[in-house]
Image (tube, rainbow, N blue to C red):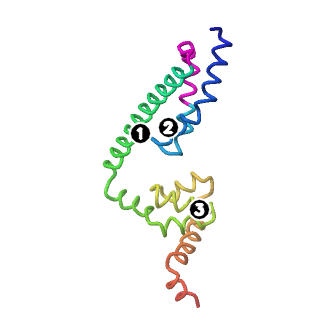
Amino acid sequence: MSNHEQCDHLTSVLATDSPALLNYLQRRVGIQDSPDLLAEVMITAWRRIAVLPKDPEQARMWLFGIARNVLADHSRGERRRWRLADRIRSRTSAADATTAAADTHYEVQDAVSRLPADLAELVRLVHWDGFTLADAAELTGVSASTARSRYQRARAQLRVALFPEEARQTIP
């Protein structure tokens, strides 16, 4: 088969079998990762076009074999990422763990997300990422005094959002 014929054949096989491949991948990794994995299957198929079987059914099985290998690589990568995340979590100090736990509270996440973007970023950098206010100012590209005033404004808005009863009592 000529290169042109191989390309046409692979294009035809992919056009026919891509929906089934996508379903195969979705059932194993979910809807979010499956398009990327299908793209990886297609790239691998194009790279290995010289060994593409001529028979359409054998070509289909060949593609599913590639998909199976892509899934295996994906699973190994996921396991490596989880192990790394576990190692990183186990090395954090108790103080860091306490600080990091604050961002798991949905009320706090919601209140922070409703702040203006510049205020929310300061709160996240200071409380969730552990930066000093001076470091957060540098990271966001504002002066330290601007960061302090924005931080105070963010704290006041969060106090009202998270403790409305107390906020009403302090308003004259």
Q: Nearer the viewer, residue 123 or 78?
A: 78
**Which amino acid, mark 3?**
Ala
SS state under label 3: helix
Measure the alpha-carbon separation of dots 1 and 2.
18 Å
- Residue farthest to the top? 2
Quadrant for residue 82, please give it.
top left
Image location (x, y in percent) of residue 61:
49, 24
Measure the alpha-carbon separation of dots 1 and 3.
38 Å
Residue highlighted by disc 1: 78
Residue highlighted by disc 3: 147
Residue range highlighted in magenta: 40-55
Image location (x, y in percent) of residue 60:
53, 25
Q: Nearer the viewer, residue 70 or 168?
A: 70
Q: Quick one: label 2 or label 3, which is nearer the N terminus? A: 2
Residue highlighted by disc 2: 24
Q: Nearer the viewer, residue 45 or 142?
A: 45
Residue located 63% across and 19% down the image? 9
SS state under label 1: helix
Q: Quick one: label 1 or label 3, which is nearer the N terminus? A: 1
Callouts 1 and 2 close, C-beta under 8 Å: no
